[in-house]
Image: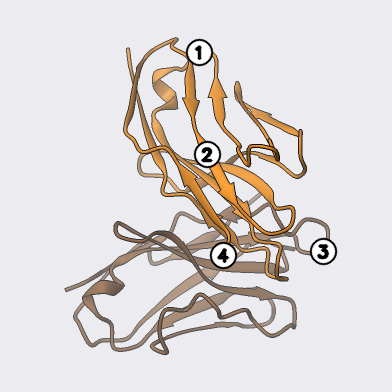
Chain colours: A orange, B brown
Amino acid sequence: GDSVTQMEGPVTLSEEAFLTINCTYTATGYPSLFWYVQYPGEGLQLLLKATKADDKGSNKGFEATYRKETTSFHLEKGSVQVSDSAVYFCALSGRMDSSYKLIFGSGTRLLVRP
Amino acid sequence: GAGVSQSPSNKVTEKGKDVELRCDPISGHTALYWYRQSLGQGLEFLIYFQGNSAPDKSGLPSDRFSAERTGGSVSTLTIQRTQQEDSAVYLCASSLGASDFETQYFGPGTRLLVL
């Protein structure tokens, strides 16, 4: 079945460092790909998405490119801030049936230190 | 506008009791999803409703779990005879449906603790 694998955390960075969180997927067909973020004590928020190969999703300085050849959707940010500390989830939309349910990775906790 | 709301925000219950969790989707959203977030299993899909179609119940972990969606809006997730392994955060999400099924907006969740 469809699945998402993302790098284990926690990832600890200093402010203004470059961030990469790796995400790879296994899917039949052509899923849409998402990054969701969960700030401490808050619910899941959509960060960015890409619906087809070579699309780049971007938001709040974060970017991810849908790479079909490597089945990847790595999240990047050029300069992280303390306020970016959160748990990041990679997900795909399982369009192989009609429900469009999301299949999530295990989450990666990011801690940014001043 | 108002987002997805869920109630209660926290629920503590004793093993064997029934619980009901409520979700109010964003107005105008025709698709509604329930997920469960637990330490051992991560984020798991439970059930999906779309309009008047039969729900996709493929993610429900046992027959103790059921859900309803009345009038195409509010949904209730019921867990009967709760077990300790049911302890988790239960998340509800909604999406526009026909014009955008895939972008799901999540509520704050209900944290369930079964003692």
Q: Please name the residue shown 51% across and 56% down the image.
A: B107
Label 3 to label 1: alpha-carbon separation: 37 Å
Q: CB under 8 Å between callouts 3 and 1?
A: no
Q: Secondary structure at mark 3?
A: loop
Which corner quadrant of the image does residue A94 belong to?
Answer: bottom right
User: Looking at the image, which is closer to me, B3 or A31?
Assistant: A31
Whole-percent x, y for residue A78 in the image: 54, 14
Whole-percent x, y for residue A60 in the image: 60, 25
The residue beneath circle 3 is B98
The image's mark for residue A1 is 4
Amino acid under label 4?
Gly
The residue beneath circle 2 is A23
Name the quadrant of the N terminus of chain A.
bottom right
Q: Residues within 10 Å of mark 1 (few under 14, many from 20)?
A: some
Q: Residues within 10 Å of mark 4 (few under 14, many from 20)?
A: few
Q: Secondary structure at mark 4?
A: loop
The residue beneath circle 1 is A79
Q: Secondary structure at mark 1?
A: loop
Q: Chain of mark 3?
A: B
Label 3 to label 4: alpha-carbon separation: 25 Å
Q: CB under 8 Å between callouts 3 and 4?
A: no
Q: Please name the residue shown 57% across and 47% down the image.
A: A25
User: Looking at the image, which is closer to me, B67 or A72?
Assistant: A72
Amino acid under label 1?
Ser
Q: Residues within 10 Å of mark 2 (few under 14, many from 20)?
A: many
